[in-house]
Amino acid sequence: MNYELKQKPNLPLGSLWNLSFGFFGVQIAYSLQSANISRIFATLGADPHSLSYFWILPPLMGILVQPIVGALSDKTWCRFGRRIPYLFVGAAAAVLVMCLLPNAGSFGMAVSTAMVFGLLSLMFLDTSINMAMQPFKMLVGDMVNESQKTLAYSIQSFLCNAGSVAGFVFPFLFTVLGISNEAPKGVIPDSVIYSFYVGAAILILCVIYTSLKVKEWNPKTYASYNGLTKPLNEEKVNVFQLLAHAPKTFWTVGLVQFFCWAAFMYMWIYTNGAIASVCWDVDMTAADATKTAAYQEAGNWVGILFAVQAIGSVVWAMVLPRFKNRKRAYAASLAIGGIGFALMPLFHNQYMQFIPFLLIGCAWAAMLAMPFTLVTNALQGYGHMGVYLGLFNGTICVPQIAAALLGGIILSLAGSVQSNMMVVAGILLVIGAFSVFVIKEKTVTE
């Protein structure tokens, strides 16, 4: 049976908001992870040159989990929908692990055992976050027409960054409220532990909201809006055939993604050490550097800086839809972010660091909105949106894995100075900006 292609309707602003609202909670969990993983493992005793290896697990789980979630959810239909069951189960699992991970040093285990416990917790946390995160991208791809996609992904970007602000500032806020930011050797401070607890509670509440508010299309309705020959739950999927027939935009946007996500991986890994040395004069080559109060204070300030980045991203996300030329806006945003990275080692005042992180926020806003707008527009009529977006997640995960594997080597080449890794990140973003012009964009009129 052939389904006549129907135009997806325009959705009211409230519906676009509801599609992505749960992303606010998911991003709180993700930001707590990204801002505190290096701090947690450094506190447990990890060497700076091996620190990047602890970051291999998150993108590795993403590249494994998200295509599976995409493929399974394409074929799923139950009373709760197609994507919603996966995001709800993922969020519930994330809540459990978020209560365990920051306690890696609190159970009286030996350092090596605590490291293994932390790694296993990190693996399960990132698996569950990926399981919860991917459906939100698929919901927009499923239910939003091309003319509204930039707006829809900008709303998602706004909620993402608002969640980031909340997650990033929690440790600093709890310290101000009197919760201890210091702890015995090898133990994570209570300010970080309580941040994970509160983030877990907000995550599940936000996901419940989206689960109750969003009603997904059934397979036949979805097929009619995408011109498919049969509903996806009746069609067999060959991932390799799908990749072979993927539009060129899928691959060229992936090239840009490689440089962007490698750059941000280095930011997440090395910002704690960079800020501690540049702004707090902590000698990060010293064996006891991570055990000092100054390092933990710098760790809290990194959360504030990441929040500033998220605020810059929120503002820039509202500006991006106003650009008529997506590619120029994308390239300019990445170049601005590259300049921000290059400026970071030059500012020794902690408040002056707001300037580079605001600039970095411009790149982050574009990275969250532009790739999925370009790719989902190019995939219109291809079907299997969930599988394709799961596969496209590989363009996020592979560069992070490569960056993590090479991090220790590049750090040594950079004189073992963690702030120099910010310059490396800036160079990568500028290369990504030039790569944008390789993309052949499909417009809504094509």
Image (cartoon, rainbow, N blue to C red):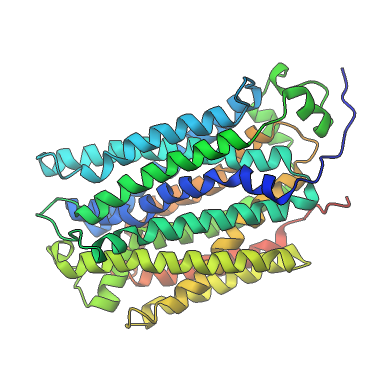
Residue 112 shown left or right of residue 196 in the figure? left
**Taking 96 as reference, is 395 above or below it?**
below
Residue 237 shown left or right of residue 305 in the figure? right
Q: Residue 182: image x %, image y %? A: 15, 60
**Taking 49 as reference, is 204 above or below it?**
above
**Taking 367 as reference, is 358 above or below it?**
below
Q: Residue 133: image x %, image y %? A: 52, 41
Residue ID at (57%, 74%): 336
Residue 75 shown left or right of residue 12 in the figure? left
Whether residue 65 is visible: yes
Whether residue 284 is visible: no
Query: Which one is nearer the viewer's eye here, 107 or 213?
Result: 213
Residue ID at (24%, 56%): 191
Residue ID at (76%, 51%): 148
Q: Residue 224: image x %, image y %? A: 83, 28
Query: Which one is nearer the viewer's eye here, 229 or 141?
Result: 141
Query: Which one is nearer the viewer's eye here, 344 or 303?
Result: 303
Residue ID at (87%, 25%): 3
Q: Quadrant of the N terminus?
A: top right
Q: Residue 108: image x %, image y %? A: 9, 40
Give the number of callouts: 0
